Image (cartoon, helix red, strand yellow):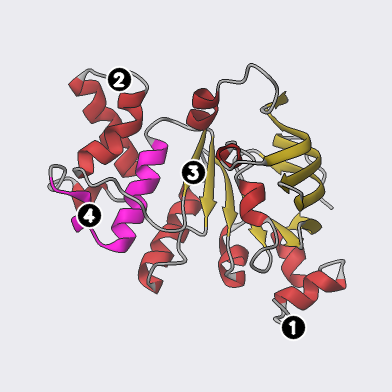
C-alpha cells in the first residue's frame, strides 16, 4: 500500500448510503497531488459513487448520506459552511458522455468564468483560448469559435468539455470514463491529454478499460462491491498485486 506525504485528498472511514442501501464500505485512501489515480472494478462496485464524493455531486440525490470524512487540502468538504460553488470550481468534472451545451464553442468554454463573474471580453477571450489550448483542441476550433458546439465530432466535444472544466482553473479534475464513448483515435488523444494535464492538476479517472488504466495512471485503486480491495502504484497493481482478487479481475477471470 502506498504511503503519501503529498496527498491532496484524504478519505477516512468513508461509508456511503443510498437510503438504506450501503454503496461504500469503510474507505480509507490518500490521493497524491498532480498525479493520475485510476479507479477500476466491475460495474456497480462503487467507483463512480466514490468519484462523486469529491465534488459533492451525490448530494443532489435524495436520501443519500455518509459517515466518515473527505478532506481536500486538509479541510473536510462535508462540514457545515463549505461553499459548494467554490468547491465545484476547485474540483472540475468530465462525464462519460460528452455534454456540450447547445451554444457556440466560445460560449461553452466561457460558461464557467461567466458564472464566476468574468465579464471583460478581452479577459474572457484569453481564458477561453488558454483552456482550449490546455485541452488540445485550440488548433481545431480557433476558426470555429462562433459555431454551435454540437457540430463538433464526439472526440472534439469531449475535449471541449474538458476545456470547459479547465476554464475555471480547478485544482482537481474528476473524469468518469471520459473516453468510453469514443473511437480509438479520439481515445488516444484524450489519454495523451491526461498525461499533459497531470503536470498542473490532480486527476482521478474512473475506467473500465484495464489497458487505459495501466497507460494513463500513476496509482490504481481496485474496488469490488463497494470496498477498496487494493490500492498501490499502477505498475505494482498490474504486475504484482498483493491480493488474488485483484489479480483475478485484472487478468479477466471475473468482472
Disc nearer the start of the sequence (3/2): 3
Between the C-alphas of marks 4 and 2, the distance is 24 Å
Give the quarter of the image for residue 255: bottom right
Where residue 52 sits in the image (x, y, percent)?
60, 44
In the rendered image, the residue lying farthest to the bottom is: 253
Q: Is residue 106 left or right of residue 35?
A: left
Task: Please give the range of residues in magenta.
Answer: 147-166
Where residue 102 sits in the image (x, y, percent)?
23, 47
Q: Is residue 39 magenta?
A: no
Disc nearer the start of the sequence (1/2): 2
Where residue 167 sits in the image (x, y, percent)?
37, 34
Give the SS element for disc 2: loop
Between the C-alphas of marks 4 and 1, the distance is 40 Å
Q: Is residue 115 left or right of residue 147?
A: right
Give the quarter of the image for residue 131: top left
Residue under the image location 51 percent in, 59 percent down: 177
Secondary structure mostly taken by the magenta-highlighted segment of the chain: helix
Q: Name the front one of labels 4 and 2.
A: 4
Q: Which residue is mark 2?
A: 118
Q: Which residue is mark 3?
A: 93
Mark 1: few/some/many CA within 10 Å (<14, 14-19, 20+): few
Name the disc covering residue 253, or none.
1
Residue under the image location 77 percent in, 52 percent down: 22
Amino acid at each position: 500500500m502506498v504511503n503519501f506525504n503529498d496527498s491532496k485528498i484524504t478519505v477516512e472511514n468513508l461509508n456511503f448510503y443510498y437510503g438504506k442501501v450501503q454503496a461504500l464500505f469503510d474507505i480509507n485512501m490518500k490521493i497524491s497531488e498532480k498525479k493520475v489515480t485510476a479507479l477500476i472494478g466491475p460495474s456497480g462496485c462503487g467507483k463512480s459513487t466514490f468519484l462523486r464524493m469529491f465534488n459533492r455531486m451525490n448530494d443532489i440525490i435524495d436520501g443519500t448520506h455518509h459517515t466518515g470524512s473527505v478532506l481536500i487540502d486538509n479541510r473536510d468538504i462535508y462540514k457545515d459552511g463549505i461553499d459548494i460553488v467554490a468547491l465545484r470550481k476547485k474540483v472540475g468534472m468530465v462525464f462519460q458522455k460528452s455534454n456540450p451545451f447547445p451554444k457556440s464553442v466560445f460560449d461553452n468554454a466561457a460558461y464557467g468564468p461567466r458564472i464566476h463573474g468574468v465579464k471583460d471580453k478581452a479577459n474572457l477571450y484569453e481564458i477561453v483560448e488558454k483552456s482550449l489550448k490546455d485541452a488540445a483542441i485550440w488548433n481545431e476550433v480557433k476558426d470555429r469559435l462562433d459555431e454551435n458546439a454540437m457540430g463538433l465530432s464526439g472526440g472534439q466535444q469531449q475535449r471541449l468539455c474538458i476545456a470547459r472544466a479547465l476554464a475555471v482553473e480547478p485544482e482537481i479534475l474528476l473524469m468518469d470514463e471520459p473516453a468510453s464513448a469514443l473511437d480509438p483515435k479520439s481515445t488516444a488523444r484524450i489519454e495523451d491529454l491526461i498525461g499533459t494535464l497531470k503536470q498542473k492538476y490532480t486527476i482521478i479517472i474512473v475506467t473500465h478499460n484495464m489497458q487505459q488504466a495501466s497507460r494513463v495512471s500513476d496509482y490504481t485503486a481496485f474496488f469490488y462491491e463497494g470496498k477498496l480491495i487494493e490500492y498501490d502504484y499502477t505498475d505494482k497493481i498490474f504486475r504484482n498485486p498483493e491480493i488474488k482478487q485483484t489479480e483475478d479481475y485484472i487478468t479477466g477471470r471475473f468482472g
